[in-house]
Structures are given as structure tokens and as C-alpha cells.
Image (spheres, rainbow, N blue to C red):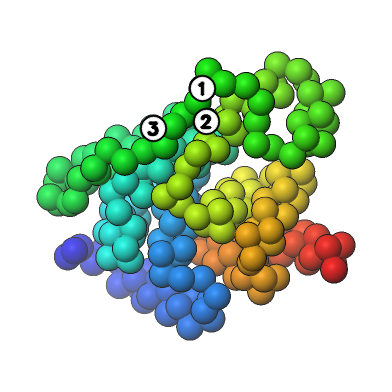
């Protein structure tokens, strides 16, 4: 995609940043990095040029149009539905503008009318004690995503960790998402790479998250 140079110095800084990340962050696949870029776009609502570039890069990295939609369905849990919906609308525009691959309609069973939740029971009880209606909302959101299969558990854990870093929700949810990533076979260095990668979207938030991550990993050792 050809884009007009808006500021040559800014472009040099951005290219140097991307080059360092590519060299330093070897723990994450190109697909995983593409998903995390898009996650940040949803959370930050950077749905112009960055989102366009990230969508095209994701497709080049093997992320399908169906995968992109599952990402937006999944991240709506934490980013909020309005932010994810804005990204979905922009994605549809990009598919039309650039004649990109369209989704096949592959999706998961939502199970909105079911009951219970895949969340750990202890967490559910703690949230219910805090606020029962909120606990029912959390159950619904978790249950509606339980049958997702296009994104791996590792990918979903990394996505939610990135949301936590960007929003600085580094207590209950970050602890749960780090635990999910470890349970999916991610190593401590993989997790540090996820947080380090998020520095691209805000260095100081990543700095703070690295401190919290180190404490969590020390406690899990």
C-alpha cells in the first residue's frame, strides 16, 4: 500500500521502532504480533492509517477475514462493544475499498441463552459477592465466547493481556490472563515479550506492566 510521506522524521522514528521490535521480540509469531496490533487499534480507536496497515499486514501473516471477525467479537468483552463495533465497520469498508478477502461466515455458537460460565468458580464467586448483576453480565460475556475456535487459547490470552496493559487493568484481570497464558504453555519470556511489544502503543504503560508481571511470575514460581 503506497502512502504519502507526511513527515520524514516521524517515518524514520517509526521505522526504527518497528525494526527494533522485529529484532528483539522473537518469541511472538508474525500472526500473534498482527493480532496484538489490531487489538491496540481497537482499544485506542486508531482506525485510520494504522488500522489499514495492520489489517493488510494481518492478512499477509495468515490471519483470515473470519479470524479478524473473531478477534473483534472476542476483544469486545474488554474494549467494550462500541469500540469493537467501530472497528468492525471500518474493516468492512477496507474490504470493499481494497477488494480484500471476504469472510466465509465461519463463526462459533454464541449460547447467549445458556447458563453458567467457563470462568473459574472462585472468580465467579468473588465477583458475585461484589455485585451479583455484574457477575451475571460477566458470565454472559464469558459464556458467549466459550466456543470460539479460530483464535487459539494462547492468542486469546495474549490479546487480553495487551488490553490490560493498554487500559492499565493490572490487578484481577491481568493476573487471570497471565495465568491463562501460562496454562496454555506460554513461557515467562513469552509473556514479557507480549508486554514489551505493547510499548509500541505506550511506553510508560508497558513499563508499569512489566513491574506487575515480574511480581506475578515470581509468585507463580
Q: Label 1: state its secondary structure.
A: loop
Q: Quadrant of the N terminus?
A: bottom left
Nearest-to-viewer mark from 3 and 2:
2
User: On screen, 206 above or below 136?
Assistant: below
Expressed as whole percent of the image width and height from the top left, the position of residue 72 reads 42, 41
Query: Which of the two discs, 1 and 2, labels the residue nearer the N terminus?
Result: 1
The numbered dot on residue 144 is 2
How far separated are the C-alphas under marks 3 and 1?
A: 18 Å
Q: Label 3: state its secondary structure.
A: helix
How far separated are the C-alphas under marks 3 and 2?
A: 16 Å
User: On screen, 133 above or below 12?
Assistant: above
Q: Label 2: state its secondary structure.
A: helix
Nearest-to-viewer mark from 3 and 1:
1
* Residue that numbered label 1 is attached to: 112
* Residue that numbered label 3 is attached to: 85
Q: Is there a contact, CB below 8 Å, between mark 1 and mark 2?
A: yes
Based on the displayed image, in which of its 4 quarters is residue 119 positioned?
top right
How far separated are the C-alphas under marks 1 and 2?
A: 6 Å
Query: Which of the two discs, 3 and 1, labels the residue nearer the N terminus?
Result: 3
User: On screen, 80 above or below 55?
Assistant: above
Amino acid at each position: 500500500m503506497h502512502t504519502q510521506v507526511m513527515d520524514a522524521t516521524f517515518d524514520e522514528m517509526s521505522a526504527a521502532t518497528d525494526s527494533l521490535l522485529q529484532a528483539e521480540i522473537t518469541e511472538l509469531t508474525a500472526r500473534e504480533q498482527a493480532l496484538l496490533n489490531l487489538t491496540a487499534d481497537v482499544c485506542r480507536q486508531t482506525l485510520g492509517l494504522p488500522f489499514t496497515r495492520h489489517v493488510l499486514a494481518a492478512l499477509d501473516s495468515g490471519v483470515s477475514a473470519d479470524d479478524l471477525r473473531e478477534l473483534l467479537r472476542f476483544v469486545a468483552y474488554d474494549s467494550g462493544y462500541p469500540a469493537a463495533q467501530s472497528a468492525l465497520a471500518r474493516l468492512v469498508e477496507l474490504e470493499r475499498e481494497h477488494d480484500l478477502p471476504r469472510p466465509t461466515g465461519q463463526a462459533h455458537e454464541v449460547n447467549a441463552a445458556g447458563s453458567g460460565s467457563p470462568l473459574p468458580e472462585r472468580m465467579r464467586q468473588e465477583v458475585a459477592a461484589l455485585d451479583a448483576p455484574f457477575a451475571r453480565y460477566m458470565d454472559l460475556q464469558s459464556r458467549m465466547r466459550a466456543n470460539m475456535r479460530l483464535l487459539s487459547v494462547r492468542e486469546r490470552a495474549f490479546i487480553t493481556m495487551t488490553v490490560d496493559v493498554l487500559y492499565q487493568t493490572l490487578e484481577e484481570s491481568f493476573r487471570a490472563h497471565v495465568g491463562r497464558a501460562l496454562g496454555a504453555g506460554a513461557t515467562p519470556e513469552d509473556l514479557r515479550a507480549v508486554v514489551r511489544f505493547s510499548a509500541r502503543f505506550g511506553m510508560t504503560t508497558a513499563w508499569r506492566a512489566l513491574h506487575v508481571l515480574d511480581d506475578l511470575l515470581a509468585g507463580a514460581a
